[in-house]
Amino acid sequence: MTTVQGKAFTDLGQGLAGAHGEPLLTGKGTLLPHTPLQLGLSAAREHAPAWLVAGFAQLGAPLFGGTLVPDPAAPGLVIPLVTGAAGAITLNASWPPAMPADVELFLQARVQDPAGPQGFAASNAPLGSTP
């Protein structure tokens, strides 16, 4: 495991290359209550459908030739998105005020990409941990 951005995020790997190599998903923020959180996807196919998958548990299931790391089952979620002209997406939010310590949030992005196995690329999987 390597640090993605700051102490709160650890990179679990599991990316799957597409047209521009493995898309990179990064997290920035401390994951303290009411603090800024930024998620960034880069090196993805341009103007492509993408999905941000988030879960509070690790699934590790095979999906489109790679591994789906987060478990999107409730209370997890899947957010449909579209990459921009640079093959990137930036999401800004605030960390919730009532999140307890020692919570783990698993993240990963999937991008529709004909150059990827089975027509999809996958980002690495950042793990966010609340202090």
Image: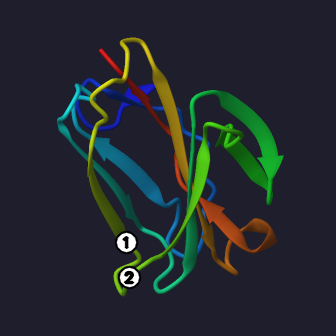
Identify the colour scheme used: rainbow
In percent of the image, x 17 and y 36: which residue is there? 35
**Which of the two residues, 45 or 93, is positioned nearer the viewer here?**
93
Amino acid beneath label 1: Ala
| Left or right position of 30 against 49 | left
Q: Position of residue 41 (x, y in %)?
A: 40, 61
- The answer to whether 48 is drawn above or below residue 128 in the figure is below
Q: How far apart are marks 1 and 2 (CA)?
A: 5 Å
**Which of the two residues, 52 or 95, is positioned nearer the viewer here?**
95
Mark 2 lies on a secondary structure that is loop
Q: Position of residue 54 (x, y in %)?
A: 55, 44
Amino acid beneath label 2: Gly
| Crowd band around label 2 with a 10 angstrom C-alpha radius: few (<14), some (14–19), many (20+) | some
Q: Where is residue 5 in the image (x, y as percent from the top left)?
A: 26, 37
- The answer to whether 117 is drawn above or below residue 33 in the figure is below
Mark 1 lies on a secondary structure that is loop
In percent of the image, x 54 and y 39: which residue is there? 13
| Left or right position of 33 against 87 | left
- The answer to whether 52 is drawn above or below residue 10 in the figure is below
The part of the image, by quadrant, that contains residue 18 is bottom right
| Crowd band around label 1 with a 10 angstrom C-alpha radius: few (<14), some (14–19), many (20+) | many
In percent of the image, x 34 and y 81: which residue is there? 86
Q: Residue 88 carries which label?
A: 1
Q: Residue 84 carries which label?
A: 2
- The answer to whether 123 is drawn above or below residue 55 in the figure is below
Residue furthest front as drawn:
98
Q: Where is residue 1 in the image (x, y as percent from the top left)?
A: 47, 25
